[in-house]
Image (cartoon, rainbow, N blue to C red):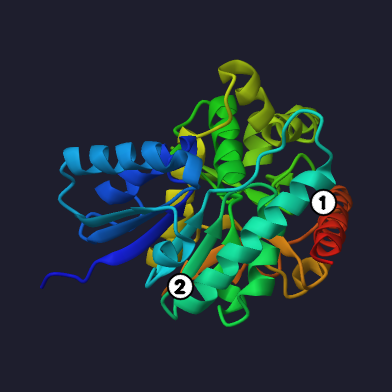
Amino acid sequence: MARDPVRVLVTGAAGQIGYAIVPMVARGVMLGPDQPVILHMLDIEPAAEALKGVKMELIDAAFPLLKGVLATTDVVEACTGVNIAVMVGGFPRKEGMERKDVMSKNVSIYKAQASALEKHAAADCKVLVVANPANTNALILKEFAPSIPEKNITCLTRLDHNRALGQISERVNVQVSDVKNVIIWGNHSSTQYPDVNHATVNTSSGEKPVRELVADDKWLNGDFITTVQQRGAAIIKARKLSSALSAASSACDHIRDWVLGTPKGTWVSMGVYSDGSYGIQSGLIYSFPVTCEGGKWSIVQGLKVDEFSREKMDATAKELMEEKSLAYSCLN
């Protein structure tokens, strides 16, 4: 029996990440090979012509799963009836700008978009915030869309999670699909903590702990962490543009696992609303290890946290609390 199409909103759709993600959504990478979709694409007025061009290309690509495309600069029209919202649009930090300036711009963007989602999105709408500062933008969105359940508002740390998997797979020379259960704790920023203490690698002689296989704690506690933390900056330096392809792919991974479920015995990293787990103050959007089933995520409980990890987890929580204060000061 034919399935009803799912309406997927992508904001900032004419930008780099938007341009990379919309064909993935239309091809079934996000929601599976048998799920039809209707794409809602939103961008700002100066990008309206470029957005029209993206719509033309989507039509020209003749994706069998794509049952409709809406391209608009009207936030209400874009949000109406959507089941999944991927919030890519935001105000980027420009040279000479203070953090507070960027925060202030993003607070006003996310306040407006939250209000539109609140009033016009489908009741069960799932929201993924990609635009930086992702954790705090998600928190602002939650504040101004109170009827959207807090469990339905998340931010993207899957990109960092995938970067960590990639670094380990290269280091021990295995397929990336053989590495699992790394964790990104905290903020999608340079204070995030990529943790391999519970990660394993599938080898010909069974699952082995990453620490045992790498056998180099100095690298795992040093260069590995900083490489993952600084990867975005390294890509900007090399490409002269920020990560787009990998961000789009990771956003699809995040939504796919959230909607369709994580494989048994595997967890992923998602920025979610803290309930106080692992001593992280509730009221922050913080990245935790989660498993997903039936369209719902759950924080993995009971993992041992050593002193080194505790310090890193608390440092990134502290930064998030500072960001939250800054964001709330912009509301007044």
- Tag 1 near tag 2, CB within 8 Å: no
The kind of residue tagged 2 is Cys
The kind of residue tagged 1 is Thr
The mark nearer the N terminus, 1 or 2, is 2
Per the image, the residue denoted by label 2 is 125
Is disc 2 placed on a helix, strand or loop? Answer: loop
- Estimate the x, y position of residue 100 in percent, counting from the top left: 83, 48
- Give the quadrant of the C terminus: bottom right
Distance between mark 1 and mark 2 Cα atoms: 28 Å
Residue drawn at x 44%, y 53% is 73
- Estimate the x, y position of residue 96 in percent, counting from the top left: 82, 30
- Any mark on residue 74, and which? none
Per the image, the residue denoted by label 1 is 316
**Residue 330 seen in render:** yes
Residue drawn at x 44%, y 33% is 175
Question: Is residue 77 rendered to the left or right of residue 64?
Answer: right
Residue drawn at x 33%, y 65% is 7
**Residue 253 seen in render:** no
